[in-house]
Amino acid sequence: MKFGPMKPHRRQRLMVVGLIVLCSSAAVMLAMMALEENVNLFYSPNEIVKGEAPVDTMIRAGGMVLEGSVVRSETDLTVDFVIGDLVAAEVPVRYTGILPDLFREGQGVVARGRLTPEGVFVADEVLAKHDENYMPPEVADVIARAHENETPAGESGGQ
């Protein structure tokens, strides 16, 4: 085996391969950073009330808009309402903007926004169901889990 100075064409080939590896690594790193910033995790009202949801981080929250909870501001487009899982957990939501036409009490919604340290969910976007048979899958799962954990009145835990 002969060691010595590298031939110019091999040195050039090695530099091209090194440059390709470096550029590919940079592209993968930038893509991963962009994807990480766009991830919005979903939290149910129960998880938010328990303190499992991060504060001041973009998340999604979903549940049913509770009857009698919608309060519209008379001076601007701010709407305050409460979402819940129809068992016990309730989260106050504040949204400034135009709500979807299908938004109303007793309907499922998914909101994207940030949870404040005071426990108020400040929404940037509110999505409502689109017809009589549809409910966002996340909201349907939250309600189903809440009803599974609910003990009917009059039953005791022991047998």
Image (cartoon, rainbow, N blue to C red):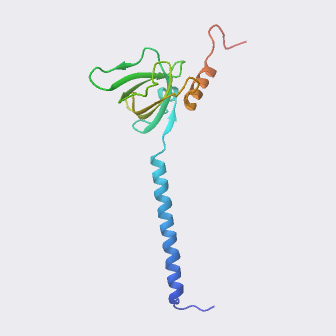
Is 72 placed above or below 42 here?
A: above
Residue at x 48% of width, y 73% of height: 19
- Which residue is the extreme one toward the left? 75
Image spot of residue 146 (x, y percent): 58, 22
Residue pictured at 51% horizontal, 66% vertical: 24
- Look at 61% across and 20% down and name the residue there: 147
Q: Is residue 140 above or below residue 20?
A: above
Q: In what quadrant of the picture does the C terminus appear?
A: top right
Residue 41: horizontal and vertical position, in percent?
Answer: 50, 38
Residue 111, located in which quarter of the rendered image? Answer: top left
Residue 75 placement, left or right of 71: left
> Split into 4 quadrants, where in the image is the N terminus?
bottom right
| Residue lying farthest to the top in this orientation | 154
Report if residue 43 is visible in the image: yes
Is 158 situated left or right of 13 in this image?
right
Out of 110 and 128, give the one closest to the viewer: 128
Q: Tell which of 23 and 76 is nearer to you.
A: 76
Q: Is residue 90 visible?
A: no
Q: Nearer the viewer, residue 56 or 143?
A: 143
Q: Residue shown at 37%/29% (left/top)?
A: 98
Is residue 7 shown above or below 136?
below
Residue situated furthest right in the rendering: 159
Residue 138 pos. (x, y %):
56, 31
For the image, the number of numbered tags is 0
Residue 72 location (% of width, % of height)? 34, 20
